[in-house]
Image (tube, helix red, strand yellow):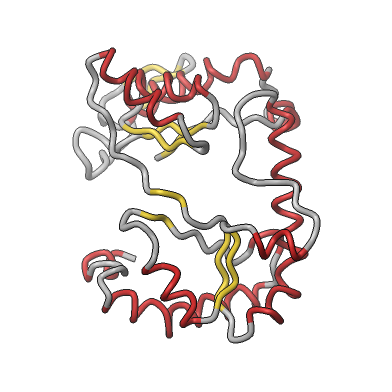
Amino acid sequence: ITLGLGYRPHEYRMFGIEQQQRVRVLEDTIRMLELAWTGEPFEHRGERVVVRPRPHQRPRPPLYIGGSAEASAYRAARLGDGYLPAMPGLWEIYAAECQRLGRPVGPIPPARATLFLHVARDPEQAWEVVAPHVLYAARVTAEWAQERGTGGTPYQDLTTVEELAAHPRFQVLTPDQCVDYVCGLPDDAEVVLQPLMGGLPIDIGWAGLELFEAEVLPRLTSAGRGPTPAEARAS
């Protein structure tokens, strides 16, 4: 489980929470989860609560903290089992704070390769279809980040198909190009597909997933870059 503060003012209003209370709410949530996962009775808002069965993982599922500002790195070092930073430079702050507190440093998160990957027979034609949706998502997410007033975002306020196609983290590729692209990434790289990004029509996103599954994934697996047999069965 990965927890973050959120940052959009209207979302706090929707739940009747003052934005200034968000750190307290997050920390209370973490404490509640830790108590619930023990399987033993505990008090929550004046009620006696028991949550069973207990999680399979012992002593509990790993709990990660996510964020895009320095404060999230310090919070993850203090409260989390790991950290998923959204921006570069934050992991080093987290690791140093863990060492200062005498707490174990969580697993190094994967290097982020793509924010959007789509596989198509004709990438040039596919760009014309997917670009309006991806541009919308990138622009709106960049605008939302400004509401936060702190931290950053990997999304940019892109305006044209040409800008989008030139951005290294948005990729529309043929199956052959996709295999070459993934095989050229670091071993720990994380490739994100997002087949419904920005309201992309289901049939378009599904076609890209099917092409990836049929013509890319088997070749990546043969090259040692796909899921292990155990991971494939689990999915």
Percent x, y of residue 55:
27, 41
Say which residue appears at 24% left-offset and 20% top-offset. 103
Q: Position of residue 227 (x, y in %)?
A: 29, 67
Q: Nearer the viewer, residue 146 or 53?
A: 146
Which residue is depicted at the point 59% across and 86% down? 121
Residue 61 place in picture, x, y as percent: 29, 38
- The answer to whether residue 21 is left or right of residue 77 is right
Instruction: Check the picture and name the quadrant holding the C terminus.
Output: bottom left
Question: The N terminus lies in which quarter of the figure?
Answer: top left
Give me the residue at 68% from left, 29% from top.
Answer: 15
Is 215 placed left or right of 161 in the picture? left
Q: Is residue 201 above or below residue 153?
A: below
Q: Is residue 169 above or below residue 177?
A: above
Query: Which residue occupies the foreground of this view, 229 or 58?
Result: 229
Q: Is residue 157 above or below residue 99?
A: below
Q: Nearer the viewer, residue 80 or 97?
A: 97
All told, the count of numbered labels is: 0
Residue placed furthest toward the right: 159
Spot the residue most to the left. Answer: 58
Q: Quadrant of residue 10?
A: top right
Q: Between residues 6 and 180, which one lies in front from this camera angle?
A: 180
**110 lies above or below 48:** below
Residue occupying the point 76% across, 39% down: 143
